[in-house]
Amino acid sequence: MAEIAKLELEGKVYEFPVITGSENEKAIDISNLRGETGYITLDPGFKNTGSTQSAITFLDGEKGILSYRGYSIESLAEKASFLEVSYLLVFGELPTKTQLTKFEKDIRSYSLVNEEMKDIIDGFPKTAHPMGILSSLTSALTAFNPKPVDINNETQVYNAVCKTLSKFLVLASWVHRKREGFPLNYYDNSKGYVENFLRMMFAIPTEEYKVNPVVVDALDKLLVLHADHEQNCSTSTVKIVGSSHAGLFASISAGVSALWGPLHGGANQAVIEMLEEIKADGGDVDKFILKAKDKDDPFRLMGFGHRVYKNFDPRATIIKKAADDVLKELGVKDPILDIAKKLEQVALNDEYFKARNLYPNVDFYSGIIYRALGIPTEMFTVMFAIGRLPGWISQWLEMRANKEPIGRPRQVYVGSTKREFVDISKR
């Protein structure tokens, strides 16, 4: 017998079906609540509200579980490349060797960006934040690709996925190059996806650029870990924009803007800014640990704990090793990273932090890796966006394929009731 939830209002009982997910998640289906009762629910931040039924990502914050299409994040980070995971998220299955080879080839075929895009980049001052530029450039792709994607046409969908993954990577590297005053680099079809990004970011015409395999592996893992994270702020933004049948580039542009916020994708940038603050104050880690424990002190440790994961962030466990490998391989000597390692040891061993599950999260370790690679702090969120791109695409496609209605949250009005208009001469 199907489970039913009962709600009593004004002496009348209403029944609503209970939905059970494949991982035994429970939800009360209130899609007919307003029509049947005249009431709505009030849930600021949508923390108790499910907006969709999705087959893409499962997340259990209490148990520290994250999986894509049924595959644990641990197994994917260890065994799969970022493009394999991208294919999995978007198309539902891990690619065969033939499919992956074709996928990589087709992504390369779309790597050239219209030269007029350079004119758009040139219009930004050097002080512009990379995320603002990236959002604008992504939106501008619509002008060069005006025909909307027919989501019922498999060929169009496949080509749109390849085009988005390819051009977004190039544009992200161009944002950095323009800010640094370097000539723009182009995709090298003899190199892999992650290798290409590093080369486009850092290669200069006067020197041979060699890609370090340890760095490639660490960055590939980071992109895998960031690829999707269920119905978060930026993904929900992509979907609500797409629910109006706005195009893929326009929807992703909105997601970039949402990710920009310091409470979302900007967290890894905030980690480095916090470390710089500690260094500027003299580098006394113990002093700032005491400040973090003082509830009356406004200082907060960035990169510790997670709003969703109440135990530990499973992504942090994976990327900690990659961070250690990168620091060892590159032999980086940086007082900021020394402070980070001291903070890490305190958080892992201090009972105050352990009791509150304030362990270093993925933002903490990703900030360390990006810093060690020489990626400017302002570019950290761009790196996050590159990783999250396949998640945005897959969620957008699923939403359109499921024919979900246009997003239109309700509200409870608490403003003034009816008032008579007063002529300006009498105000």
Image: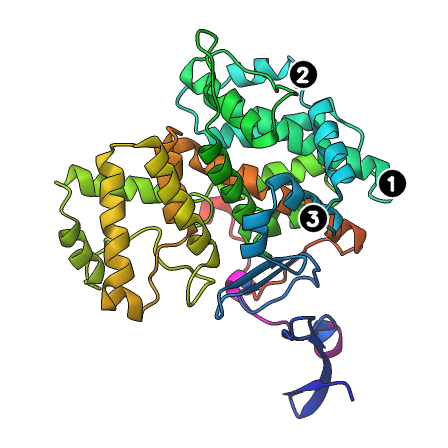
Residue for badge 3: 88
Amino acid carrying mark 3 in the image: Leu
Among the 4 quarters of the image, the one containing residue 31: bottom right
Q: Given the current orientation, which residue lies at the most extreme bottom position?
A: 11
Nearest the viewer among 48 and 154 is 154
Q: Which residue is mark 1?
A: 153
Q: Residue at x 64, y 13 (%)?
A: 116
Q: Position of residue 25 (x, y in %)?
A: 63, 73
Sequence-first disc among 3 and 2: 3
Q: Give the residue at mark 2.
A: 114
Please provide percent x and percent y for residue 190.
Answer: 64, 21
Is 243 left, or right, of 196 in this rendering?
right
Is there a contact, CB below 8 Å, between mark 1 and mark 3? no
**On the picture, is 293 further left or further right than 101?**
left
Mark whose residue sits in front, 3 or 2 = 3
Q: Residues within 10 Å of mark 1 (few under 14, many from 20)?
A: few
Q: Quadrant of residue 110?
A: top right
Q: Could you give the CA–CA distance between mark 3 and mark 2, rounded to whole angstroms?
A: 29 Å
Residue at 35% of width from left, 51% of height from top? 303
Front-most of residues 258 and 365? 365
- What's the magenta region? 35-45
The spot of residue 108 in percent (x, y) is 69, 25
